[in-house]
Amino acid sequence: MSERDFLVEIGTEELPPNALGDLSEAFENNMKAGLEQACLSFTTIHRYATPRRLAVMVRELLEQQPEKKTERLGPALTAAFDADGNPTPAALGFARSCGVEVSKLARAHKGGVEKLSFSTSQEGASAQHLLPGIVSAALDKLPIPKPMRWGSSKEEFVRPVHWVLMLYGEECIDTRILGVSTGATTRGHRFLYNHDIEVHFPTEYESLLEETGSVIPDFEKRRECIRKLVTEEGDKVGATVVVDESLLDEVTGLVEFPVALIGKFDQHFLEVPPEALIIAMKSHQRYFYLLDSDAKLMPYFITVSNIRSTDPAQVIAGNERVIRPRLADARFFYELDKKSSLESHLEQLKHIVFQKQLGTVFDKSQRVASLAVYLAEQLGADPVQCRRAALLSKCDLVTSMVAEFADLQGRMGYYYALNDGEDLVVATAIDEQYMPRFSGDSVPTSLAGSVLAIADKLDSMLGMFAIGQPPTGSRDPFALRRSAIGILRILVENKLDLNILNTINHAASGFDHVDIEQQVCLNVFEFLLDRFRSWYTDQGISIDVFQSVMALKPQRPLDFHERVLAVQHFSKLQQAHSLSAANKRVSNLLSKLDSELADSVIDATLLVEPAEKDLYEALTHKMGEVVPLFDQGLYKDGLQQLASLRESVDTFFDSVLVMSEEKSLRDNRVALLQQLRSLFLRVADISYLHKP
């Protein structure tokens, strides 16, 4: 069958820049799924997206579906014909349902039985006939939370649609999509070439838009073009441009023909904390900022325009006029906030509700301060400094700067604490309290910061569980899953050996108006440890390894992590399969015995078989080697040593009847196997590694 290239483009009003990438990807994926479901094969599929269009190009798309062959099976021959060879009512009914005489029916074997059969073939539908429906279905499935209507049309889409291009080879597919008649024309840049452009065949689409329409339709190509342009502008002043990827995506979604321009702001604005200036430039104006060789903010910005101006100096001057009042506002807020100390804002926190049942932000600060002292004592930090940082940690929430730029909470507390003469340790902890803020963010670098971050997150988590509002499958308004991962990351990455269950129990005592039962504490503990599951999955560690450690529920997350790494290493050894199978076998055996029998002691005089004597000697020897290693937390080394038990264990199970009729022998052998399993259980339950 022959193939042709296919192109569809939806021309719209300006699409939301933050959603453009997702819309484009979904359109491509939906088209791919629709074509595959229709059995229309193709070689490649590629998406295009600009503020005014979503498009998909399909290369070498099959012109027609393959012929569909179907076979219907009727009654068995023994039931289809009587003793004289005449068709029975069953055969006649089957033939009638197929629309043919009995003589036209064929025969086929199914399950060793010969049956009547009838085969038909149906010519596949043409791509021209199927494509309008496939495109419409792909558009209907786009992730559009609030679709719009326009004019008197009942059609809905993310933005009003102005044109639709549908080209199959050189042929325009005549139909209506989203209330608009299709054609073979696209449209150029709104300002640089706002005219129709006729497309004769799909493969010229991209070049026509670029060369004639002043539009770069490929999102990724335009994105990298912007990266290159802003970097070149930074090079002109010897600066490094900080290209934030999310900002780059947003800017890419705003322009069709990018032009980078560098502007400047007054030097005196650099007296304001750089984070405030950066967020004003990024959030309000979508500017890229520049750093000098010492990584300090420079009084420059780069804007990306959607037009090629004949007088770029005027465009730059206009942007400089716009950014000046934004930066002036930031400076005003900063100077105003410095007139009051952080501590003076404590009283205001009493009027801000954290959660109705858990009290105010002031109440939370008091609980976090108490927990921070406990954590400081456990981890070797200064309790006085940690308590001070916790008490002041939320005070910047009522400052003018944070009211304007909420993302600066914590960071502005750092600057205001230093301005108040607070210790650098206290200021740093205030800054680090929310870390890690998002997936991939850094954890606190200071010990006091780690203490405050753990205390703050754990208080929220325990409180929400206590009032019956833990995360559900669809809701997690207090981001408790993220907080749990954050606590684990802080403890593991900073190598802080903390008993988290004891910490949870201590935190529970700090809630004055909420009665927290022990089961709630256990639920929070298990919720925390279960977050390791997704963490290890992302690292390529199997779920079986995680479960082998989770079965023991170690109370120290750092210890949990070390066990997982050790079991992961052990699982790759040749001996792992045999030993995990043996542990599974022993586990099953012990589960069937009563507790008294399972706790019996080994009597060396009752070891009669060579294989059981050998296992006893090997096990006794290994215990002397690995127990000290396990006591020191050297799990990897200990499991490596235990791997050498494989031969003795295999020989034991091959040669020794555990469930001997003689009770004393049976009990002794069970005790031997229990000791073997108990030794492995000092690290993990490796029976989870066994794959039958």
Image (spheres, rainbow, N blue to C red):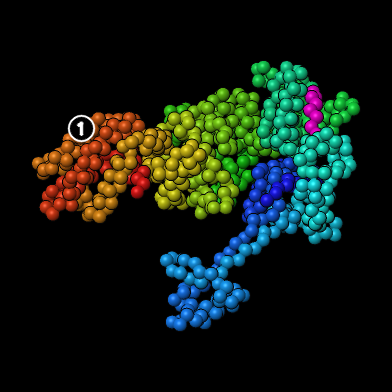
On the image, the x and y values in percent for residue 509 come to: 44, 44
Q: Residue shown at 65%/44% (left/top)? A: 43
In this rendering, does residue 145 appear at all? no
Position of residue 418 in the picture relative to residue 154 (left or right): left
**What count of labels does the image hold?**
1
On the image, the x and y values in percent for residue 373 come to: 46, 34
Q: Residues within 10 Å of mark 1 (few under 14, many from 20)?
A: few
Q: Residue shown at 23%/33% (left/top)? A: 622
Q: Nearer the viewer, residue 113 or 281?
A: 113
Disc 1 designates what residue? 621
The quarter of the displayed image where residue 300 is located: top right
* Amino acid type shown at disc 1: His
- The main secondary structure of the magenta stretch is strand
Position of residue 166 in the picture relative to residue 363 (left or right): right
What secondary structure is marked by label 1?
Answer: helix
Q: Residue shown at 70%/49% (left/top)? A: 2
> What stretch of residues is rendered in magenta?
256-265
